[in-house]
Image (spheres, helix red, strand yellow):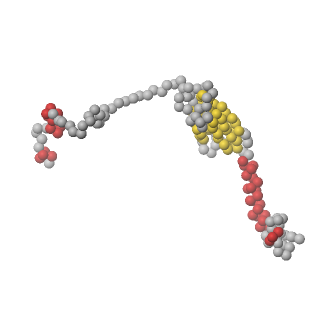
Amino acid sequence: MLRGYFAIPGILRAGLVRGRSPVPARFLNLCLGPFLAVLLSAPLAAQTTGELSGVVSDDRGQPLAGALISIESPFLIAPQRTQISDKVGRFTFPSLPIGTYQVTVELEGSATQQVEEVEITVKKTTNLHVRLSPSTVLDQINVTSRTPVVDPTQISQSQVFDLEYLETATIGLLNRDYLDVIK
């Protein structure tokens, strides 16, 4: 009935004129072929990733919010990805390429924790529980002080200059003449 032409049942039926499809088979193969290939390959591409999730807690098991979690791997396009743990200490890195990762967890006041060779597998969630202990190294803080430009003890808007100040100050030189400026 439809020789040399391609007809999709139910779709092109309305376009049939005297028993023939208005769309040639070659045209449909050229247009629908690549479209169907891309459409069918999308689920296959999604299957090449995994997920890393976990919890950051202190040495007593209490969740730690605000911890910086960094992952590094040669499989990443960017050299490093980072997340911050939420209020219950959780973090998630979705859609990671499969491979081996190095995980670093940092929090101010706690010792930095590194976990080597965390394996991400296809379509699986790798769970990681990291316990941070308090930092044993104390940072040294140096405090320096400078003399303020403004005297904070003075609260008046005027100042009285005594004779001793005027004689020793550079503006109170006795031998000063306005003509010295021109010379």
Decide if residue 174 is on the left or right side of residue 53: left
Does 87 appear above or below 181?
Answer: above
Q: In which quarter of the image is the N terminus?
A: bottom right
Residue 6 visible within the image = no
> Looking at the image, is 109 positioned above or below residue 91?
above
With 66 as the anchor, is 160 left or right in this view? left
* Residue that appears at 82% across and 74% down: 17
Residue 153 sits above or below residue 38 on the image: above
Determine the residue positioned at 68% across, 40% down. 51
Q: Quadrant of residue 55?
A: top right
Residue furthest toward the top?
136
Quadrant of the image occupied by residue 147: top left
Q: Position of residue 171 (x, y in %)?
A: 17, 39
Name the residue at the bottom extreme. 18
Q: Which residue is more in the foreground, 176 or 14?
A: 14
In the image, is 151 to the left or to the right of 100?
left
